[in-house]
Amino acid sequence: SFRHFNPTIPLIFMPHDEVNTLKTRSLANKYDFQIFFNSSLFEEIDQTCHLTGGGNSSQYQKLAMWSGPLDEFLYLDTDTVVLDSIDFVWPLLEQVDVAMAHLGISSDFKENDRQSNLKEGIIDSDILGQDQTDHDGQTGVILSSKRFGSTEGLLEKIKAEVTAIKEHFSSMSTDQPLFHYLFATSGKRYSSFSRIADEKSTNKIKLEVRASDESNLKVTHDHRVLLNTGDESTPIFLVNWASKKKFNKHRPLNELWQFWHDLSLSE
């Protein structure tokens, strides 16, 4: 689906290990992407982030994006169906150094996300202030550039500070508390697509939704997604957490995933 809506933009795939590297090489020419795999860097990320005590180590390897070949980039988890052009994101880098996408479309998601990423005690401990815990977003979609920093610098920060902060990380949120902390304490400009859209009162910034939001979504005849109000003024550019396994119980989204999956096989 990504190449259908973004046929020419440079695309980099970061496999988790050598096995996945071999599996994806045969697809590189067909879908015009490069493979970025640095085993020593990935091992260092794995060992460093193991100190946080949470999650699958492969989820932290996205830290390598700041050492990749692109100066400006949009990171996407692979369990994502992309439903539009991503060209709208690049002008946002004039306003921010790092931004995550919208967590969901319900008004209470922001508060729930903060509570699930970081335990309430982090405010009382003076590690983060209220304003630093209130930004909404999730790490399956990250817009940034090398202005934000380097992978090596982020790893050093984790090593130096993780012991004092990991007790405030929710064990249920894997990598998200760590990235939340890194962004909030970076001294750089950080935000989310949804926050920028609210601040600018614009509908030109497209939003991300999760497959688990299926009751709020409507799949269109051309295999795209709208809010179930049918409001076309709120464009959805991707569905995160998208896989056959996760869609099994949600028929419309299962059909959406199946369409784009089958299209890739037929091309």
Image (tube, rainbow, N blue to C red):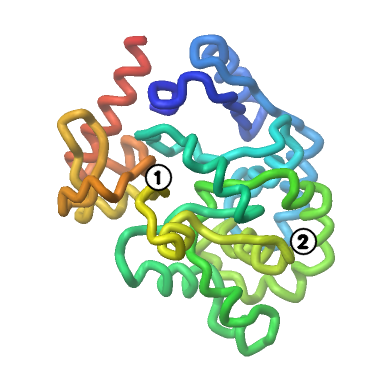
| Label 1 environment density (alpha carbons within 10 Å; few <14, some 14–19, many ≥20) | many
Left or right of 38? Residue 59 is: left
Q: Quadrant of residue 84?
A: top left
x, y percentage for residue 244?
A: 32, 35
Instruction: Answer whether labels 1 and 2 touch (C-beta < 8 Å).
Output: no
Left or right of 13? Residue 5 is: left
> How many numbered discs sit on the rendered protein?
2
Residue 119 seen in render: yes
Q: Quadrant of the N terminus?
A: top left
- Along the line of sight, which residue is nearer the eye, 205 or 245? 205
Query: Is the residue 203 above or below the residue 107 in the image?
Result: above
- Along the line of sight, which residue is nearer the eye, 59 or 204? 204
Q: Where is mark 2, residue-wise?
A: 158
Q: Quadrant of the C terminus?
A: top left
Which element type, helix, strand or loop, lies under badge 2? helix
Callout 1 amino acid: Asn
On residue 36, the disc is none
Residue at image position (58%, 20%) is 33
Q: Where is mark 1, residue-wise?
A: 240
Left or right of 50? Residue 116 is: left
Residue at image position (17%, 40%) is 251
